[in-house]
Amino acid sequence: MPSFEIEGKLHKKFDTESKTQTFQAREFVIEIQDGNYPQLIKFQLTQDRCAVLDNFEEGQQIKVMFDLRGREWQGKYFTNLNAWRVEAATSAEEAPPPPNEDFDFPTVSDEPPAADNDLPF
């Protein structure tokens, strides 16, 4: 299944809920700008991943890696954005500078070294 990633501002995080004795889930919402209107997108973390969100505060820029999950229940269809990783987003000023294009990288040759070297073997 393909996975996706998106960056946005952590708009709201909810408490972890125990859905059954063996299953827990935690939802959160990020805000992204789409033209003139902000979009609020809800994600879900499950099981041991629920605690990942503890390290982030509402209003913080985050990057979410997720996959799509869908199911049918009693004739109704549900789609979940199942987050499997959340990390702080790096802004342009925090990103490392691009490599210096004026630097000459050494070249590597596929030819064996010349036989007239002074190595003992």
Image (cartoon, rainbow, N blue to C red):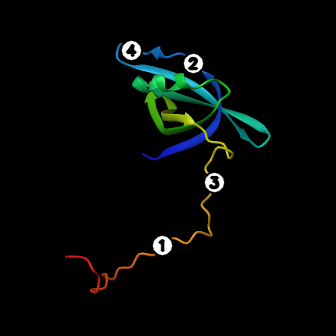
Few, some or many residues within 10 Å of mark 2 (<14, 14–19, 20+): few
Q: Which one is in front in this view, the residue at disc 3 or the one at disc 1? A: 1
**Residue under the image location 55 percent in, 72 percent down:** 104
Q: CA distance from mark 2 to mark 1?
A: 53 Å
Q: Is residue 60 above or below residue 118?
A: above
Residue located beneath label 1 in the image: 106
Q: CA distance from mark 2 to mark 3?
A: 36 Å
Contact, mark 2 vs mark 3 (Cβ under 8 Å): no
The amino acid type of the residue labelled 2 equals Phe
Q: Which one is in front in this view, the residue at disc 4 or the one at disc 1? A: 1
Residue located beneath label 3 in the image: 97
- x and y percent of residue 26 in the render? 50, 21
Position of the C terminus, as image quadrant, is: bottom left
The amino acid type of the residue labelled 1 equals Pro
What is the count of numbered marks?
Answer: 4
Q: CA distance from mark 4 to mark 1?
A: 60 Å
Q: Secondary structure at mark 2?
A: loop
Q: Which one is in front in this view, the residue at disc 2 or the one at disc 1? A: 1
Q: Is residue 1 above or below residue 74?
A: below
| Left or right for 21, reference 88 | left
Q: CA distance from mark 3 to mark 1?
A: 21 Å
The amino acid type of the residue labelled 3 equals Pro
Residue located beneath label 2 in the image: 14
Q: CA distance from mark 4 to mark 2?
A: 17 Å
Q: Secondary structure at mark 3?
A: loop
40 or 108: which is nearer to us?
A: 108
